[in-house]
Amino acid sequence: MRGMRWGAAAAGLLTVVAGLGLRTAATGVVAKYGGDALYTVLVYVLVVMVAPRIRPGRAAVAALLVSWGVEFFQLTGLPARWSAESTAARLVLGSTFNVPDLLWYAAGAGGCWAVHQCLVRGRGRMRSTTGEES
């Protein structure tokens, strides 16, 4: 369990670095939608850090629901108001509802699910070949 938390923490750090790099190196839709997918990747990582034994499918659904919840919250206008005054609010909540964002959040959650599923299966195979108990 501790190993999963450390792995998630490392993945979170890499995700933040990737997001900052994307904002620096890319423009337009690549930066916008790549950032959306990475947003959900970071939420996924936080879910795994809090609940390291969570199944990949449940983690993906949780990350997707949080991301979609934040996106729909933008319809209230509050995130736009807060984002105008705070960089942190802008990074966490965004400001403007955009339907395509919903798809890119799903892409981020799906990518995380696939990687996490492979890691879980790989660890299971490794345990069975080394004789460790699951």
Image (cartoon, rainbow, N blue to C red):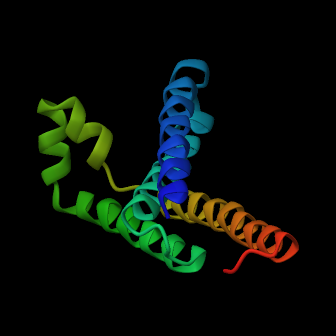
User: The C terminus lies in which quarter of the figure?
Assistant: bottom right
Residue at x 49% of width, y 76% of height: 54
Picture residue at 47% right of the left edge, 35% below the top: 16
> Is 94 situated left or right of 31 in this image?
left
Please give left or right for residue 91 compared with residue 40 in the image: left
Q: Name the spot of residue 17 as percent of width and height, x first.
A: 52, 29
* Residue 107 on image: x %, y %: 62, 61
Q: Is residue 131 above or below residue 13?
A: below
- Residue at image x 76%, y 73%? 121
Q: Nearer the viewer, residue 105 or 53?
A: 53
**Residue at the extreme top of the image, as rendered:** 24
Total labels: the figure holds 0
Q: Is residue 94 visible?
A: no
Image x and y of residue 52, in percent: 47, 67
Using the image as rendered, state which of residue 27 and residue 2 is in the foreground. Answer: 2
Evaluate whether residue 79 shows in this view.
yes
Dividing the picture into quarters, in which one does residue 108 lie?
A: bottom right
Camera-nearest residue between 67 and 75 = 67
